[in-house]
Every structure is written in structure tokens, then in C-alpha cells.
Image (cartoon, rainbow, N blue to C red):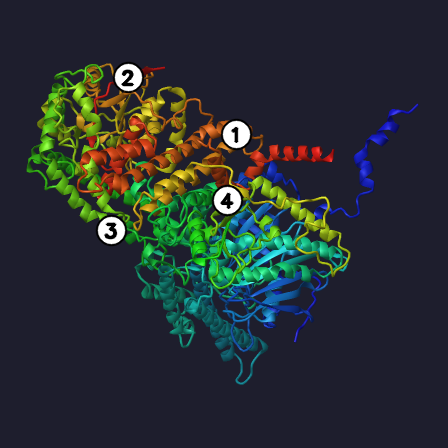
Amino acid sequence: MIGSPDVVAFTKEDEYGETSPDPWALPKEFSVPLHPPCDSNPWSKTSYAKFTKDFILISEFSEQVGPQPLLTIPDDPKVCGTFDLNYFSLRIMSVDYQASFVGHPPGTGYPRLSFVEDSRVVLGDSKEGAFAYVHHLTLYDLEARGFVRPFCMAYVSADERKIMLQFQELSLRFSQASECLKSGNRRAFAKELQRKLRDLEYTHSVLQREEGLQREAAPQSMYSAHAVEKANELANVEKSIYEHRDLLRQISSYHQRPRRDPNAVTCHKCITECVSECEKLLEKYAKLAKPFTYSDKGEKGEDGQGQIDHEGGEEVDAEDDEGVKRRPSYTPQLIKAKSAKCFDKRLKTLQELCDDTFYNATVELLKDTERCFRGDLSYLHTRRLDRALRKKLRVTNFLFEEDLRDDDEDEGGTLRPFCAVNHAVDNFTLTLNPPPIVLGPEPLELDALEPPDPLDPASETSHTHESELGLVESHLESSPSDQTLETQESSEETKGSFSSDKSGLGQAEGQQNLAMTSEGPDPDSDLTPDPDQNTDLERESSSEDIETTAGEDEGDQTPVSLLEVMSELEGREDECEVVTNGACEVESDLLVPLDTACCMAQEGFLYEASAPETVPRFGQNSNVQHDQTLVVNQEPQALLPLQDDYTVGSSCPESPAAGLELPVGLLGDAVSRTSVEDGSDCTMSASTGSDRAASPLGYGGVVTLRQRKRAGQGALRFVRQYPFAMQALWCLLSGRTLVVLGADEGRVRRLVAALALFVPGPGKCGERVQAWLSCPFTLTDLQRWKLIGLQRVASPVGSSMLYSLSRYSRYISILDADQKTLRCPPYHGQLLANIADHRTYIRRGSTYFLHLQSTLCHLAAKAFLFTFTHHLHLPVSFTEGPEVVEGRRRCFLQEQLGLGEEDSRILLYLSQLITQQYLQPATGSGAAAPCFSFNYTTSVFYKI
Amino acid sequence: MSRIIIIHSYSWEDKDIFQAILMSSGCPPQSPAVAKSEVTVEGECPLLAATFAYWDNILGPRVRHIWTPKGDQSMFLSDGEVTFLANHTLNGEILRSAECGAVDVKFFVLAEKGVIIVSLIFDGELKGDKNTCALSVILPQTELAFYLPLHTICVERLKHVIRKGRIWMQKGYNIISVLSLEIVPIMELLALMKSHSVPEDIDIKDTVLNDDDIGDSCHEDFLHKAISSHLQTCGCSIVVGSNPEKVNKIVRTLCLFLTPAERKCSRLCKADSSFKYDTGLFVQGLLKDSTGSFVLPFRQVLYSPYPTTHIDVDINTVKQMPPCHEHTYNQRRYMHSELSALWKTDSEEDIPPETVIHTDETFTPDLNIFQDVMHKDTLVKSFIDEVFMLKPGLSLRSTYLAQFLLLLHRKALTLLKYIEDETQKGKKPFRSLRNLKTDLDLTVEGDLNIVMAFAEKLRAGLHSFVFGKPFYTSLQERDVLMSF
């Protein structure tokens, strides 16, 4: 009977097969895998490294212990994990290419310093899954072998491609850091030489005195062995003095040598300073034709030591500036005949080798570099491309994109145009050949190299002329962050003080001018009453005539005040157009050289575009005559200058609390005097809610990409939770103000932050969004803000707020965050179906944000097309009337772009904003005041 | 006169002594016989030299062969300098602990010498011993910006020739003859790219997109198909034709849809003579010969990192290769087949021809690799329709193009992120393609292909991850069926 073990022997076919492999089969190590692991997981390529994320490693080739790691950035052991830094340091330092010969070359009497250029190497350890960009540099140390200390800075990553594809950016960054270290090191080296020279001179004087004494004591022409020894010692010291003086001369001539490295990054300010300081030193020691002045001085007094010290101190005091006095004077020391060059000496740390200022600046720069290159290559790559492309889209960027410059600062996407010690940008040049960037186009960097504002105090004060050689106490120049902070504060203070005045002026102007005009300040503005009084007045007036909402009875009961405003505006329309044209002529040069004729021709379209659509309805639903302008261009008091300088309502206040405070008097007075019928006050209360941090909006900062990404999560939640999200988004995208009503400030703020992503042209600081309002709003506010978070309160103020809501409900949509309801016109389009589908499988807010970005980008592109397609806005022949052109436009929207009526409204609104932005690009904030338009469509009440 | 200094042991302190010895002698100890080949290259070749060095167990780093281009060069390196630099590439490799068969890349920028060196480090058998070897290419540092975009192309091509060379070394044959098979074409490639690469910034006026009307120079659907297929094949296309101006105009047009770095890896055609196809370039213009034909080397096209679109501007046809996952699979099969054929070679004289399709009975590649463009898209279609509505001559079309590209890049990143979320960065298989299409508005197959192609460039292997399994299953089924 056959037992199971016998069977097993025949079942192991594989093993059996292995015993006689095909001799002609290609061995695995010579083959290419048909199914490499990256096929089953494209993310696995970088997953087997022993460190969790990229880091920067500084290593040294120590003459005592060999290659050793010194520092990692970030300085967190978790980052490196179990990765063997010692081994990796050994690996990266063993490819060091420093052809730095130091010593006595043939034919020269003194040791020579060799100024070697940095070398850059990309290498890897495929087994460990670690790859590195390694930047080798040499620092000088008087006590080191050959006076050199080899170091390297390495950017370590698990992704080899990431390093190679960003080689030039890495090289530029690390060159900056290296230059910074080397600048500091040269100063420290010169300082060390100075000390050494003083020691030597002192030693010389002591030896000379001793030798003199011995000579005097000994019989004539007889020299004792001791005296001979002293004489030899003296000669050695003298030689050493000459050698060190020569070293000083060499280090001073560092900048005179031609640079061989076309990729080196040099700060001229650093060079100039260093050269001048070195020259000073050199001059000082070159003066000593007899290098032994110490001995003369020493002999003068009985107590040589004390005298020398004293005089030495004075010498420095006399020669150097005032700053020296704060510095403890150096006491020269006697140098023993045999100086120690052995293993028991302590090597200087990197910090000691470089000036503190420079060391700290370098570390900061490297930290910034680490932050800048952090993350997956695909994201970094797309971000660079994204930025480069957006630079070409200045015309539409304002709609949905964050500010490019702020993105730079926030994301660190580009290179800092400063030298590491924060010298001003105008000193920064790339020597010989600025390296182009591989992934991102060059303009990306070129743009970053734009000089700073000459009025910027940071750039003026960033450089001090104090010595950095150690003769003078080096004052740390303020770090970039400090400067930014100070500058920001000071500028905001200034801005704040001006703007509050200006807002008053703007209000006053608003009474007389139309939206796009900017005339002199109204002298009446000085008559603005006390804010407190004004508040009271307005609160009283706010209880006036309650109106029905448009949804309830439309058209017939158009508020009198509004009609008055409209008729007033109608009369001034011509004036507005003239001014607009003027603005176009002045500003168009600053823009992309598009064809302005297209936009100019659109003015009619701009202000009349919705007429054909709304007129029939208007005719049907109201008794207002057809010839009346149906688009309110501008509320009288809501003028453009006001929009820009109006800090009270804007989201860029000098302090968070102040941002929400309204100088009630100024605005309130203006409002009450302009249109008493409005009957609303503008009192806003500063919120003390605990959940303020929930929203980035309304606290004065520029809205950054990071904040927007965070808001993406809220937007996704909104879309998932509210089945009528699409209607709400349509309101925002078509320019209808959406009011988010709620009792809980945190919830409202979060909702507003999420919905703000959909507000076209929200402004650099989100000026079109009011995250939290605790008071009734006015018609002006509706023109200014497209998204408002409104507090629901039960007090009398609350009732006036409800009144204002009800009064303006025909112009606004109301999202009740507490009841989860929405009142707005119906939307049946398809354009937004993709971003507002509550059944979406998108899991993360960040992914939804990306999806949203591409959808909004698509919308902006369509709006651009619509705006700048000439034949849609210009008559083809003289016989064509505006109706034909309008018909063509509508046909284009419906047939070419396949948009229904409601979807078309989105595009019309975006196009309107683009035109306005194009014609008036210099409003500064990036948020052009949109025309205030409305139409009478029945609102529908949605609830979950 | 060369000197050989052997130092048996040294401490870290002696490193400077080594350097001092090397520097004082001007160059490192030179081995007595370094073979040198001079390669005649048309035009200015930016490459200074290529070297093959290995770590001799007694002598340390040693150069075996030097290739230099013949002709005028902006910079000259003596043989001693070349040897010194080549030796340097092996510094530190005594510590190498890579897996057998791995090819590691080192990239040096040595400002002190004014050169850049690209070294591929690998292990190979020389005279019965395992040695660490380095195949290096030396260029002037001034060519850094020119070279960097081409780095991947050069490295991938050299890696494959090293695979072949290792087999040759294993058999005890001379590796130099195998390495020369790729070193010389790379010299030629760099020389041609120096003179004929597409500029980083393309003026839209030199492209079809500046025409007054879509029908001015191309039939509408041809342009749409060409751009759509070009994008579906990751921006990798060959444009063939008889009229160099026409060819170059299409080349520039296609390059508008590439990144600046990718444009630097694209080549225009030369009016008076025909270039041969070069593996790895993104877009290349190629002229037909006098008979109106162009011979496309099957192997080289298959070795391209991405599938390719074939555009004939004479007859307005657009053909494309299978998508990335199929292309990669075919490529690996072919490589495997080629290496196997080499492994089976009996004599050093018989370096197998580059076309090995007849030498391996187990592998029959599908020679009909260029197929009609099957999948229509809406993204390019609407772009083409719309862009011509904008007035030419202004920057309107450039702006609209930038918007289109921004949209594609963003969609690609969104898709990548979507898959990342769904699969926990590849830890789980991706099973929700239908949801992805709906959620990201990519229900039209052509649109999905375009966005997937963009995403593939961001995350290599994405196609195989998403579509690989069904593809491999169908292949297995086919094989089973054929075995009956």
C-alpha cells in the first residue's frame, strides 16, 4: 500500500521541476520582470524606505571619526525611523569630490587655501530605498587638518524621480544654503585668524623679552642652549605670524577669484560686506611692517601682560566702530611651541565654524526647503504646472483661484529670492547662468525674483552695515518672519487708520457718484455724527415699512426706495459708461494683450444683457415699464473706492475683532441720509463666539489655498447633507446673494467657509463674503457681499433682522442652517450636477476640492470663451441690431455650449465679472464690485 | 608617465594624503591600456566622453574603455582627465550593497571640473570575478539645463544596454561591443537634440491653432483626432510626412499640449535629410524618403516609455498604440525575449540583431501595433470647436489653451487622488471605475483615456493598477484557448 509520504514526493511538482531547470532559461538577475510590484501598487515604489518622509541631513567627514551625521531637518527621530544615518553618511561622504589640496604646494612658502567649488551629487541606495541629493562643501578651520572641514547637506527621499526632476530647484536652494554657511565661515575664520595673530604677536613679544633677558644675562658672544632654543622658538613664531598673515590675505582674496561654478548663488551684499571687512583686517595687520609691535608696547610697562591687554583692547576700540565697545575684548594667550594637532582636541561644531547669524539663517533656509519639497511628486509637479498655467490666466484667475503670490508664501512653491541672511532681493543674482527649472517654466522663478516694494521697510532695514567679521558684535538681522510680521503690522496700522477715514470719504462720495467714478472727497463727510448716536438713529429707522417678499407677491410691490434708486441710476448711466471707457484705456496696458474691443463692445451687453430675458417676465409679473433699466448697476453709496478701502465690512481688518466692527456712524449716516426708506442700520457686532477659528473668512487674512482645501471638506459635507445643495450653489454662481442664517456661530461660519468656495470673484481676502453678521443688512451690503452668515437672535434686533431678510428676500436666497431649509429660485440645469451630487462617492474633502477646482476652472474657461468671442458681442454688419446680437449670444449659450436658461445665467454672471475685471483691473483687492442685478423669479422653499 | 601607488590600509586621516597624491600627479594612476573609440557624430555633440570603468580588486577603480565624439567640441578633456573622472564615479562603491542585477544611477555636477557625469553602477562578471562597474557619460556643466530633461531617456536606454552587457560579461565576452550599440546612438541623439529640439516656449503663431479657421491647414476631424490621440498616448507622438514645414507645424501644435520640460524632449524634423526614430522622445517629426515611405523600427517604438500616436500629415491619418498597461506588458515581453535570445547566443561574434522577433519561438509580438483611434472624446472636441471661435493673432487662444491644459492637469490629479482614496494608496484593488467615471464626469471613454494618460505620467503604473488585472486575465484566457 502506498502511504501518503510517498504520494507527497510526487505531488511536489515545483520542487521536482527546480532540480532540473532549463539551462537556456534566462536567470532572474538578467531578466526584466513581467509583473513588477509597481504594477500591483504604483504607490509601493517609495513605501519600503525605512524613513517616513523626506528629510535633510547634514553630515561631516570628521578627521577623527570619519563620516558622521550632525543634524537632520526636521529634527525629529520619528522622521528617520530605523534608517541608519551613520551608514548613509558614510555612503554620501564617500563620493565627496573636493579636489582641495591644502598644504605647501611646491614653490610656495606658505600653506595655501584652496577655494573649491561645491559639488552636487545624486545617488541612492536601492537596497535601502533611499536616494539623496548631496551638496558637498568645504569650510575652513584653523585647527583642522589642512584647515579644511568637509561637510555635506543632503536631501534624502525615497523617490529618486522626485530628486532628479527637481534637481535644479534643489541645487539652487542648497547653493544658497551653502553660500550662507561659507560666508559665515569665512568671517569666523578671519576672526579666528585675527585672534591667532594676536596670540602669536603676544607670544612673540614674550619670547623676545625672555630672549633679550637671556642674552643680557649670558656672557658676550656666548649663547646657552636655552637661548638658542628661545631664538628658534622666536623664529618659528615669526614664521607662523607670516603664515597666518598670508592666510588672512588669502581668505580676503576669496571673492577675487573667478567662480567656476555657473550654478553658484551669490549675494552681492554678503560679498561686499565680507570683502570690506577682510580688507580692513588685512590693512590692520599689513600695517605692522614690523609685526612685533606688541613687544615694543610690552616693554614699555613693567607689567607687560596687563599693559598689552589694555592696549590691545584700546587698539581695537580705536580702530573699530562703536559697536566694538559692547564686545568683551580678547585677551591674547601665550602659544606653546608645539601646537596640538592630535586626536584629543575638540573639533569645532558647525555652529562654531560659522557665524551664528549665518548658521541660523542656513538652518531656517533648509527648514524652508524641506517644507517646500515636502509631499508627493505628483502633487508638487501639478502644483508647479498649475501655477505656471495660472500665470497666463490673469484675466480669469480672480474668479475662483487663490492669489498666486500668496500661494507662493503659503506653499513655499517657489524659491525665496533672498539670500539666506535676508539681504534684500536687489542684491540677489544668480551668477553667470541662472538655471532654468525643469518642471515649472522659468517665469515661475523669474516672477519670484521681482524686487520688493521699495517702500517696504523690511527691505530697507533688512541690511545693516555692521561688521560680520567678529570685530563688531554681529547683530542678527531680523528674520523673514519677524520682518513680515512687523511690516504687516505697521502697514496694517497705517492701512487701518487711513481706511477708516477713507471709508467715510468713500461713503460720502457714494452719495454723489456712480459706481466706477472716483472723485474728490465729499466735504460733508466731516459732518458724520457720532457712531453711537447714529446707531440709535438707524435702529429706530429700521422698524419702518415692512415689505413682502418677492416670492409671495412679486413685482407689483417693488420697494419705492429701490425704484428711486433705479431711476436715479438710469439717469447717470451715460456718465458711468464714459468713465468706464476711460478706466479701460488707462488700465488695459497692464493686462494680457487681449482685444479690448470685444469687452468695450460688451458694455451694452454688460449692463443690458439680462434685459431681453427679464423684460418679458418683468412685463408679465410687474407693472414696471419696459424702458426702465432692469439691472441696477450700483447702489449709490456702494462705490468702487469704497469697496477697496472699506475696512469695516471687508475681511481684511487690522485685528480679528476689528474686522467685524463697523464704524456705524460713517456708514450708517451715509445710508440714512441717502435712502431713509431703506430703513436699515449697519451695526455689526464683533463676535465673541468660541468657534471663530472654524472659518478663515472674515478675520483679515488672505484666503490661502490651504484654507480653501480645508473648506473643501465642509463643501463636500454640505453637498452630501443637503439635497438642495445644487440650488444653493447655483445662487452663488449666478450672483444671487445667499444668506446663511443660524444661531450657532460656529456652524454658520463653517457653512460660509465651505460655500465661499463657490463665490465667483470672492476677493483676495474674501471681501465678497461676510462670515458672521449680527445685525440687519442693507441693500448696499447685498451689493457688496455675495455670501452672508447671519446670526439668528431672539431679541428685538433679531426681529429687525428678520424684517430685513423678509424685505430683501426677492434679491437674496436664504439658507437656514438651523431648520435646514433653503428659499431660492428653482434650478433645473445640468451644469452643476457633477459638483452637487449628494450621492457622490468622493470620500475626502481634499479630493472633492480638487474636483471642484477643475469644474470651476472649466466654468471659468467657458465664461472666458463667451466673453471674448467677438462675433457674439459685435454686430457683423451695420444692419444688425442689438436684438440680433443678443439672439446670437443666446444661441451660442444654448446650442454651442448646450446650456439651459439657468445654466446660462451662471455664465452670463461670470462673463460680466470678467468684463468688469478686465476693464477695471487695478482695484487692488482683486474683487471687482459686481453690478447689482436681480430678476423677479418666484422663490421656492426647499427643505430636507 | 603613469604611476601606480598601492596603499594597503589607511585611516580617515589619510584621505587627504590620497587626494594630495592624486592632485600632485595631476591625474590618477593611469592603467597602461585604456582603449578608446572615436565616434563620428554629425553636428555639435554636447557629450564629452563616455567611459566604462570597473572596480579592480587590486588596482581599485580602473577605466576600461573611452568613447569620444570626433569633431569640434566646446570643451576638451584629456584622456587623463576623463580617466580621473571615470574613476571618481566608482568612489564609495566598495560599500555597494545593491541586489544582484540592480542598476543604480549616480549623477554628479562637478563645478570644480566644469563637468556633469551620469554614471550607471552595476555588477558584472569580469574574468570570473564579480566586479562593480560603471558606465558613465560626461558632459560640460554648461549643458546641465539641456541635459536634465533628457536624463530619463538616456538612463533608460543605457539601463537596457547594460542588461544586455551583463549577459555578455557573464558569458566572458567583451562588453564594449554591446555598450557601443547604445552609446553611439545616444551621442547622435544629443547632437540632434542640440540643433533640432523644440523650443521651450512655442509661439502659437507657428502652429495650427493660429489658423483663421479650422479647415485652413487641416481637416477638422484630423486635427481633433491627432490631438486627442496624442493626449491619450501621454503626449508621445510621431509625425511623418513629406513636407517638412507641414510636419513641423503639427509637431509644434502637438507640443503646445506638453509641459516645457517635455517640449525639450521633442524634436522637429530636418528639411534636407531624414532623421531616424529615437526611442523616448515625446514628439518627433520624421520625413518620408523619396519613395514616400518611412520605415519605423518596431523594437524602438515598442521600447518607448509610453505608447505612441502615429500621425501622417500627407494622408491625414491618425493611428495609436494600445494603452499604457498593454504597451508596458508588450514592451517587457519583448525585452525579455531579446535578453533570452542573447543568453542563448553561442558566440561573441553573434550579437543578435536588434530585431529578435524571429529568434524566439515562444514570443510572437503583434506587429500591427498601430490601430485606429477607437475612443472619441468630448474634451478635445469641444476645445477644438471653441478655440477657433476666438480671434487669432491675439493672446486669446493661448489663454484658452492654458485654461484647457489647466483643466486636464487638475482632472488628472483629481482622478489620481480619487483612486488613492478608494484603494488606500494601492493597498486595496480598485473596483469602482464606474463610480469614478460618474463622479468625475469622465463617462466618455476618450475623456477617461486622456485624463488617465495625464495621471499615468504623474504616477507610473496607474494603468496597470486600474486596468491590468482584466487585461492579464484576458491574455491568460487567450493563451488557454490557443493551447487547445
At label 4, counting other C-alpha atoms closer than 10 Å, the crowd grade (few under 14, some 14-19, many 20 or more) is many
Using the image, determine if residue A793 lies above or below residue A764.
Answer: above
**Which mark is in front, 1 or 3?**
1
Badge number at residue A455: 3
State the quadrant of the N terminus of chain A. top right
Label 2 with label 1: CB-CB less than 8 Å: no
Q: Chain of mark 3?
A: A
Does label 3 lie on the same chain as label 4? no
Q: Earlier in the sequence, mark 2 or mark 3?
A: 3
Q: Which residue is mark 4?
A: B234
> Could you say whether the residue bearing mark 2 is in a helix, strand or loop?
strand
**Which mark is in front, 4 or 2?**
4
Q: Which residue is mark 1?
A: B433
Question: Residue A839, percent across and down?
Answer: 44, 22
Label 1 with label 4: CB-CB less than 8 Å: no
Using the image, determine if residue A916 lies above or below residue A825.
Answer: below
> Could you say whether the residue bearing mark 4 is in a helix, strand or loop?
loop
Residue A896 shows in the view:
yes
The amino acid beneath tag 1 is Leu
Label 4 with label 3: CB-CB less than 8 Å: no
Residue B114 lies left or right of residue A855; in this view the side is right
- Tell me the CA gap for discs 4 and 3: 48 Å
- Tell me the CA gap for discs 2 and 1: 37 Å
At label 3, counting other C-alpha atoms closer than 10 Å, the crowd grade (few under 14, some 14-19, many 20 or more) is few
Does label 1 lie on the same chain as label 2? no
- Tell me the CA gap for discs 4 and 2: 47 Å
Q: Residue at x 32, y 42 (%)?
A: B389
Using the image, determine if residue B238 lies above or below residue A142.
Answer: above
